[in-house]
Image (spheres, rainbow, N blue to C red):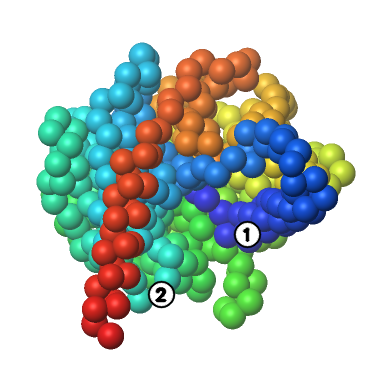
């Protein structure tokens, strides 16, 4: 889930400005009273690693998460027990997406894009029993931002990030590249696969370079042929999902929740977001069966998260709550649609009950080994550069 182009940039900018103001005030206070004991900072101001990828296994039993420190963890959803913790290779950019294999033996981690022309494998495979790296898959460009799959499809679909405007299909067994085709004029911002595996849906993000074309497209997964193009969102969609019967597509953008007929492309309904002053929709997720949508807003402080679970059919609010301690960034849902998983800036994944908004369980990511490994890697790299000079 995905994370989102302009809205994510805007949210990060607001948070960064807020942190700058806090840091400046703290520095001034320290200069005025150096002997005074500094006040304990709120939880969201503590230095932490962002959780930047979440994935739930097809049977809903396992939860996978990855952070910017290169730490990757897999837990049992029912108990919260840690199944395996691994470190994404330091030679890669960092985890961009995670997916647990359907037989629950392997976790696939996509390489996140941080710079143009970066090197590395597109997907790295880890064996869940041993924790060792079991393989890697290579493609160009070498990044994966979203995984999409269906129990009835022999392929897994992915989209990248940054400058990538294409869809890639991978053999589900060996995760070898099968097919690639350009999908939009600019970066593909969202991806979904129908339950029968026959159709893919994508959204374009707006681009000053290529012009404003915030369109949605429906594709034949077997051939890569474009079936439909729909235009309705002002800046594209940030999350997509097909209905259980595959006849409807739900899309969520910064402006509204929309329902489409995937056979004709007709817009069946649109519900505009209702926001308080200074609020904006920064993240969104459509349930796997497209029955509900969660939208995440931020208050004027740029930090406090407001979560809303709304009916995809009519926009009716089903549950609503606030999380003052976590700046949410990544979201996933259980296959049955009963649990919403959120991950943010505190190294914790929270499982919420969709009907009530109550916390069901928390999963804490231990990123200390990964942070230590990254520090050693950076030091070795710097030393090698000095020696070369």
* Residue 77: % across, % down: 37, 20
* Residue closest to the far bottom: 389
Q: Quadrant of residue 63?
A: top left
Q: How many C-alpha atoms fall within 10 Å of the one at disc 2: few (<14), some, or many (≥20)?
A: few
Residue 104 shows up from this direction: yes
Q: Quadrant of residue 61?
A: top left
* Residue 195: % across, % down: 36, 37
Q: Residue at x 50, y 48 (%)?
A: 2
**Element type at mark 1:** helix
Q: Which mark is residue 149?
A: none
Query: Foreground: 273 or 51?
Result: 51
Query: Foreground: 15 or 56?
Result: 15
* Residue closest to the far right: 277
Residue 197 shows up from this direction: no
Q: Residue at x 24, y 73 (%)?
A: 384
Earlier sequence position, callout 1 versus callout 2: 1
Q: Which residue is mark 1?
A: 9
Q: Residue at x 70, y 27 (%)?
A: 322
- Screen quadrant of the C terminus: bottom left
Q: Is residue 388 above or below residue 312?
A: below
Left or right of 181 in this view: 269: right
Query: Foreground: 167 or 161?
Result: 161
Q: Which mark is residue 116?
A: 2
Q: Is residue 168 above or below residue 329?
A: below
Contact flag, marks 1 and 2 (Cβ < 8 Å): no
* Residue 102: % across, % down: 23, 33
Q: Is residue 353 above or below residue 3?
A: above
Left or right of 158 in this view: 269: right
* Residue 317: % across, % down: 71, 26
Q: How many marks?
A: 2
Left or right of 263 in this view: 231: right
């Amino acid at each position: 889930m995905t994370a989102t182009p302009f809205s994510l940039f805007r949210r990060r900018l607001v948070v960064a400005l807020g942190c700058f103001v806090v840091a400046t005030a703290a520095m001034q206070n320290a200069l005025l009273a150096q002997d005074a004991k500094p006040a304990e900072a709120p939880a969201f101001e503590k230095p932490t690693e962002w959780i930047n990828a979440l994935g739930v296994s097809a049977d809903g039993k396992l939860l996978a998460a990855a952070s910017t420190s290169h730490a990757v963890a897999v837990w049992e959803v029912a108990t919260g027990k840690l199944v395996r913790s691994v470190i994404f290779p330091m030679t890669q950019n960092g985890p961009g997406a995670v997916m647990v294999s359907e037989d629950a033996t392997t976790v696939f981690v996509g390489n996140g894009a941080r710079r143009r022309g970066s090197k590395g494998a597109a997907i790295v495979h880890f064996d869940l029993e041993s924790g060792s790296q079991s393989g890697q898959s290579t493609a160009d460009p070498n990044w994966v931002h979203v995984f999409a799959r269906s129990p009835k499809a022999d392929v897994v679909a992915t989209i990248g990030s940054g400058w990538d405007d294409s869809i890639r299909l991978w053999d589900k067994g060996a995760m070898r590249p099968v097919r690639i085709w350009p999908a939009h004029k600019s970066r593909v911002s969202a991806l979904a696969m129908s339950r029968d595996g026959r159709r893919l849906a994508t959204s374009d993000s707006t681009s000053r370079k290529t012009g404003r074309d915030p369109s949605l497209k429906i594709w034949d997964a077997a051939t890569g042929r474009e079936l439909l193009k729909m235009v309705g969102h002002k800046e594209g969609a940030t999350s997509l999902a097909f209905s259980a019967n595959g006849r409807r597509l739900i899309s969520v953008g910064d402006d509204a929740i929309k329902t489409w007929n995937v056979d004709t492309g007709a817009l069946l309904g649109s519900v505009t977001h209702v926001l308080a002053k200074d609020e904006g929709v920064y993240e969104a997720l459509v349930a796997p069966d497209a029955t509900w949508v969660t939208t995440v807003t931020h208050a004027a402080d740029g930090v406090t998260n407001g979560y809303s679970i709304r009916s995809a059919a009519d926009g009716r609010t089903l549950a609503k709550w606030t999380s003052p301690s976590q700046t949410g960034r990544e979201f996933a849902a259980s296959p049955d649609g009963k649990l919403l998983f959120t991950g943010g800036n505190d190294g914790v994944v929270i499982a919420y009950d969709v009907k009530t908004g109550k916390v069901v369980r928390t999963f804490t990511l231990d990123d200390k080994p990964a942070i230590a490994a990254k520090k050693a890697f950076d030091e070795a790299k710097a030393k090698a550069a000095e020696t070369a000079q």
